[in-house]
Amino acid sequence: VDFGPAAKVSFGPATCRIHYLHRIAKTSHLSFSHRELRTLATAAKSMGHVNWEKVAEEVGGQRSPWQCFTRHLHLEACNAKPWHWSATADRRLEAICVELGTRDWHCIAARFGDGPDAESCRLRW
């Protein structure tokens, strides 16, 4: 494979893997179909937003885990509803973060129920 001028730059293993998965391996570079988007949303939710390899298998269509992950994040950002923080919600966020830690913002947002999304919680913290 000819990397051109980029061959002079030293790439780390993660960069090489990403390049392989997105440029060399046979992954689809077409837009997601409506069926793929529905399957993506269902699979991501059922697998807890963590196992993107399994999500990609569910979606099919030669989609990579990275494609599924980034598309899902984009869809979440587009569908995010504004959340107005109150003093009570701030205290609740603090209690949830003390209990669960701050590693999984989706889990923290889920504890709110019909409240803020994961990104709103992370930004507020």
Image: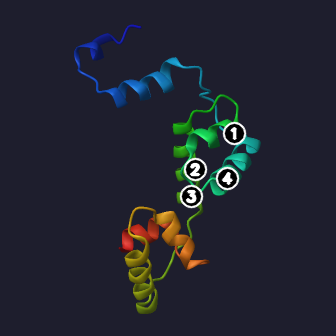
- The amino acid marked with disc number 2 is His
Rendered residue at 67%/56% (across/down): 46
Q: Quadrant of residue 35?
A: top right
What residue is disc 2 on?
72
Q: Position of residue 96 (x, y in %)?
A: 44, 78
Report which quarter residue 2 is drawn in.
top left
Q: Amino acid at mark 4?
A: Ala
Q: Which numbered disc, 4 or 2, marks the residue that appears first in the sequence?
A: 4
Whether tag 1 and tag 2 are in contact, CB under 8 A, the answer is no
Q: Residues within 10 Å of mark 3 (few under 14, many from 20)?
A: some
Which callout, 1 or 2, points to the residue nearer the camera?
Answer: 1
Q: Is residue 2 left or right of residue 64?
A: left
| Residues at discs 3 and 2 in contact (Cβ within 8 Å) | yes
Q: Which residue is mark 3?
A: 76
**Disc 3 versus disc 2: distance between alpha carbons?**
6 Å
**Residue at the (55%, 37%) spot, across then down:** 65
Q: Are marks 4 and 2 in contact (CB under 8 Å)?
A: yes
Q: Position of residue 71 (x, y in %)?
A: 56, 45
